[in-house]
Image (tube, helix red, strand yellow):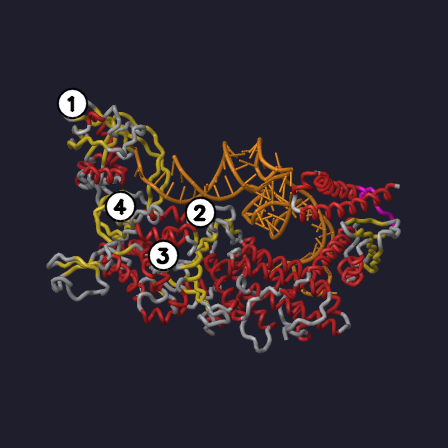
RNA sequence: GGGACAUUAGCUCAGCUGGGAGAGCGCUACCCUUACAAGGUAGAUGUCGGCAGUUCGAUCCUGUCAUGUCCCACCA
């Protein structure tokens, strides 16, 4: 039936075929399984017009592995996809496009016209990333897919906003915000990146009015003196306290401003005198609030100086800075400039220097919400994996600043606040277009022009996607079944942006946590550990990797690198390595495929030693897989299955089966074939979450007629009945002996084809018995024509080379000349090594305190080791003496 | 300025509550052995960052120093 399998596995067609089968067969849709419980992961929605990058690939791999695992376990699973409108990113992209095409900005269009352009762009490129997610094998239910600007999320956003507004938790305020002059919008604190910049302290003299006293202030931003409305000193500072209440004269604009005392001023820092610019500095704004200072805004929206900039109106701050300094020098008020490295805020999207600026913005009062969000994690309602990331989460939420949610953009959720032009009433409305003012019933009113921060809708995402706030939709989409969702998988870089906000919003509107567990995965970097970036050109294109190595190999690589670490350094060569592993599986299958017809799908009754051993190893692997996937230790899962398949199954069990399968004993042959088939059925099951495609493909040859697709099949479980400890222990000795023979063969350059005679000496009756039972295996794998097994009291062959283990002496009798010096050298090396090991344990046994204090089982272990090493030493010494004489 | 995390084989990393240092890749040698050269067999490599302490015993615990990465914080 399957004789035509090619020597190497080619993934492309197989992957396409199976994804289509799964999707068209609706196998990603939630279905009640044997466990009466839902398991749901909401996929972090990527930017709608984005392109899949390595980070997304990791997102998908780790999430999809969990989903597939739980689906097989019999949970009703939902992997819910979606896309984000990504306000700033998308709008900027289209602005750039329009500019390149027609040298026009968005302000050359009406709001409606420009939004149309963005929608058109979205329609054209919007589906692209979802196709790429399919290529990765994401088993999400596309029927659930949502876009953050669809009608349903819009409804959710308005619902949430209006609720918060009516509860007084949303307010509008003239407040100092981070102003991005490129975006020409306010941005939230979380969107500001602080970068170290080489700047300077400029020392400037301010005259005190009606006196000769001069106050020297230090500032990094001399140009802002045009907006100064006070000079502040520390009230406890004896140097200056007597000046409090007097006036100072701001240079250049010659404005008289009060000298005030404020505890905030650090006597040690700078000159101890602080110029206060409430309009353009966060601290100064606070000082201004405390002291009722006037606020002067000296900047335009684009970051250039306005009329307060006097002769420098229209210049950027940076350009104005030098000119102001020059002017001060001219006026004799400039003292000196000191180099100074300081942190300057930059917009994380635009990279522009952020200008603190006072403007009217909408804020969410998050103080209480943050407390609840903190508590949920403190009480382990929501758990972080790895736990350490809780600190990051807490650090953000324990001292939250209110969240500036308004953005002066067009692309996004319009703030549902309306101002009546007749009666000045302001209200928030759940209707997209309210009919009339609720207070005066007039119909002349205007909606607030701003849109909401993208993270406002993202914060509601787990609820929105499950139908909230519409009762009917919630029922339809299974809100009660899937909320709180099971796991959130994401990178640490958006713990504040997203995780924290979802927690706050979730607790606020559903009175529940939005997810039980948060798995924070690593950041994918290049092989040298550098962040992938456009400018470095070191990005790895997932689709290219899939084309080259196959999605399974790529997924396995990502999974193998994912545990509780914070970086994955991705080297395409490693993907190649795991591609080879996938190919290995393919070929192992090719090996067993001819005997499948004589195999039964169930386990035979009278298992032999080898079969018990492999089943026991498989059982251990199954246990390890089940536990590690549950704990998000994909690295452990991958290494467990990798070494089982590669070492235990392929290198030993298949090799040991060749004899039997090529032999004449039909019954034994059928039995072995059945065990091979059993193992393989389990292997593809165990691997399916990581490598869904090849496993589903092979499953078609392994499944029973009545069984369906692997994607829905039961995940292998640990079985008490398949523990065979003795057989495992014996097999380890067997492997040690065979490897030793191979080693000895190589040490005297015996060709792989040539057969040798092997003599084994052991005093362990059980071990000897085992070797005798499995003598064919030794012959086959060590290429021996004859194997003699005797007790150590027997005479050793006179002309032979030898290696000693703790339990068995392995001799290769040789004819002709042996290079004894080589052998002596090698044995002496063995001797020193073993002696060292022995000395270590002997020392412990000689140590009275050790014998008295150590745990009994440790003492026993050490004693046993001592005995083993002693045995081994004796063997080596005897042989050395024999050689030397 | 505050904090977190890291430092283990050439590279990337794993090592659970302290009890003989591991994996993958790479490397070396020999092999086209009838599933697989995207393969097989065998092999080499570590003062577990430095120093001190606790302990019968420390890669693991404590302190300290060094180096690195990241996060937070109001740009005097």
Residue A831 vs residue A662, the one in the foreground: A831
Mark 3 falls on what kind of element?
A: helix
Q: Residue A502's mark?
A: 3
**Can I make out residue A448 in this image?**
yes
In the image, residue A759 lies at what x, y percent? 83, 55
Between the C-alphas of marks 1 and 4, the distance is 37 Å
| Residue annotated with mark 4 | A177
**Segment tinted magenta in the rendering:** A816-824
Q: Are marks 2 and 3 on the same chain?
A: yes
Q: Residue farthest to the top?
A: A212
Contact between labelled residues 4 and 2, with CB atoms less than 8 Å apart:
no
- Give neighbour class at mark 2: few <14, some 14-19, many 20+ (Cα, 10 Å): few
Name the N-terminal-most of marks 1 and 4.
4
Name the N-terminal-most of marks 1 and 3.
1
Q: Is residue A823 magenta?
A: yes
Which chain contains the residue that carries disc 3?
A
Q: Are marks 1 and 3 on the same chain?
A: yes
- Describe residue A227's horizontal placement relative to residue B15 as left or right: left
């Amino acid at each position: 039936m399957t004789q035509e399998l090619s020597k190497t596995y080619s993934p492309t067609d197989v992957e396409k075929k199976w994804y289509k089968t799964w999707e068209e067969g609706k196998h990603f849709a939630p279905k009640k399984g044997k466990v009466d419980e839902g398991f749901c992961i909401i996929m972090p929605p990527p930017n709608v017009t984005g392109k899949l990058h390595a980070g997304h690939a990791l997102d998908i791999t780790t999430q999809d592995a969990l989903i597939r695992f739980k689906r097989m376990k019999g949970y009703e699973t939902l992997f819910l996809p979606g896309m984000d409108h990504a306000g700033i990113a998308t709008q900027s992209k289209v602005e750039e496009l329009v500019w390149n095409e027609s040298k026009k900005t968005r302000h050359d269009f009406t709001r409606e016209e420009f939004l149309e352009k963005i929608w058109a762009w979205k329609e054209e490129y919007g589906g692209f990333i979802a196709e790429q997610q399919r290529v990765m094998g994401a088993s999400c239910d596309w029927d659930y897919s949502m876009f953050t600007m669809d009608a349903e999320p819009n409804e959710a956003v308005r619902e949430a906003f209006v609720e918060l507004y009516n509860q007084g938790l949303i307010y509008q305020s003239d407040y100092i915000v981070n102003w991005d002059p490129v975006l020409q919008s306010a941005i939230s604190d979380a969107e500001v990146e602080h970068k170290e910049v080489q700047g300077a302290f400029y020392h400037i003299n301010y005259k005190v009015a009606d006196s000769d006293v001069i106050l020297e202030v230090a500032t990094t931003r001399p140009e802002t003196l045009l907006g100064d409305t006070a000079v502040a000193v520390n009230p406890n500072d004896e140097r200056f306290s007597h000046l409090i209440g007097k006036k100072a004269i701001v240079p250049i604009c010659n404005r008289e401003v009060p000298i005030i005392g404020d505890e905030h001023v650090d006597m040690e820092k700078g000159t101890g005198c602080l110029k206060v610019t409430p309009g353009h500095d966060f601290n100064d704004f606070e000082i201004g609030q405390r002291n009722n200072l006037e606020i002067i805004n000296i900047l335009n929206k684009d970051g250039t100086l306005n009329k307060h900039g006097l002769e420098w109106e229209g210049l950027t701050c940076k350009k104005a800075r030098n000119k102001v300094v020059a002017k001060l020098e001219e006026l004799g008020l400039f003292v000196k400039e000191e180099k100074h490295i300081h942190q300057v805020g930059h917009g994380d999207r635009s990279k522009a220097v952020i200008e603190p600026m006072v403007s009217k913005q909408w804020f969410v009062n998050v103080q209480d919400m943050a407390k609840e969000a903190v508590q949920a994690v403190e009480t382990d309602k929501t758990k972080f994996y790895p736990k350490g990331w809780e600190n990051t989460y807490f650090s953000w939420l324990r001292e939250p600043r209110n969240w500036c949610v308004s953005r002066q953009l067009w692309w996004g959720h319009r703030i549902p606040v309306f101002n009546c032009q007749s009666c000045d009433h302001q209200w928030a409305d759940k209707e997209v277009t309210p009919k009339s003012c609720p207070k005066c019933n007039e119909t002349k009113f205007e909606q607030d022009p701003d849109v909401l921060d993208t993270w406002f809708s993202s914060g509601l995402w787990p609820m929105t996607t499950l139908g909230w706030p519409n009762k009917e939709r919630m029922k339809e989409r299974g809100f009660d079944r899937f909320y709180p969702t099971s796991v959130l998988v994401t990178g640490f870089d958006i713990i504040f942006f997203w995780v924290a906000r979802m927690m706050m919003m979730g607790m606020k509107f559903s009175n529940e946590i939005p997810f039980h567990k948060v798995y924070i995965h690593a950041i994918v970097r290049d092989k040298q550990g550098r962040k992938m970036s456009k400018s470095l050109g070191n990005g790895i294109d997932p689709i290219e990797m899939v084309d080259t190595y196959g999605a399974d190999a790529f997924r396995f690589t990502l999974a193998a690198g994912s545990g509780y670490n914070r970086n994955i350094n991705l080297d395409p060569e490693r993907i190649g390595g795991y591609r080879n592993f996938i190919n290995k599986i393919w070929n192992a299958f090719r090996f067993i495929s001819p005997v499948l017809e004589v195999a039964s799908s169930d386990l035979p009754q009278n298992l032999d030693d080898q079969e018990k051993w492999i089943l026991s190893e498989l059982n251990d692997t199954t246990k390890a897989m089940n536990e590690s996937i549950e704990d998000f230790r994909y690295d452990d899962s991958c290494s467990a299955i990798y070494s089982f398949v590669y070492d235990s199954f392929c290198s030993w069990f298949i090799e040991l089966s060749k004899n039997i399968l090529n032999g004449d004993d039909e019954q034994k042959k059928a039995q072995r074939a059945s065990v091979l088939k059993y193992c393989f059925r389990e292997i593809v099951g165990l691997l399916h979450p990581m490598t869904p495609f090849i496993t589903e493909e092979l499953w078609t040859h392994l499944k029973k007629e009545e069984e369906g697709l692997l994607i829905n099949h039961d995940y292998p479980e640990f079985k008490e009945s398949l523990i065979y400890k003795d057989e495992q222990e014996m097999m380890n000795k067997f492997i040690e002996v065979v490897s030793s023979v191979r080693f000895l063969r190589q040490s005297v350059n015996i060709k792989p084809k040539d057969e040798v005679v092997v003599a084994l000496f052991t005093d362990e009756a059980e071990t000897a018995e085992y070797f005798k039972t499995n003598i064919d295996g030794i012959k086959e794998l060590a290429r021996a024509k004859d194997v003699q097994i005797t007790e150590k009291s027997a005479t050793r062959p006179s002309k032979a080379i030898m290696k000693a283990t703790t339990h068995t002496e392995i001799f290769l009798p040789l004819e002709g000349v042996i290079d004894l010096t080589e052998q002596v050298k090698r044995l002496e090396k063995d001797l020193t090594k073993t002696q060292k090991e022995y000395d270590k344990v002997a020392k412990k046994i000689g140590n009275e305190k050790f014998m008295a204090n150590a745990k009994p089982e440790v003492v026993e272990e050490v004693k046993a080791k001592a005995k083993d090493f002693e045995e081994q030493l004796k063997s080596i010494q005897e042989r050395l003496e024999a050689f030397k004489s």
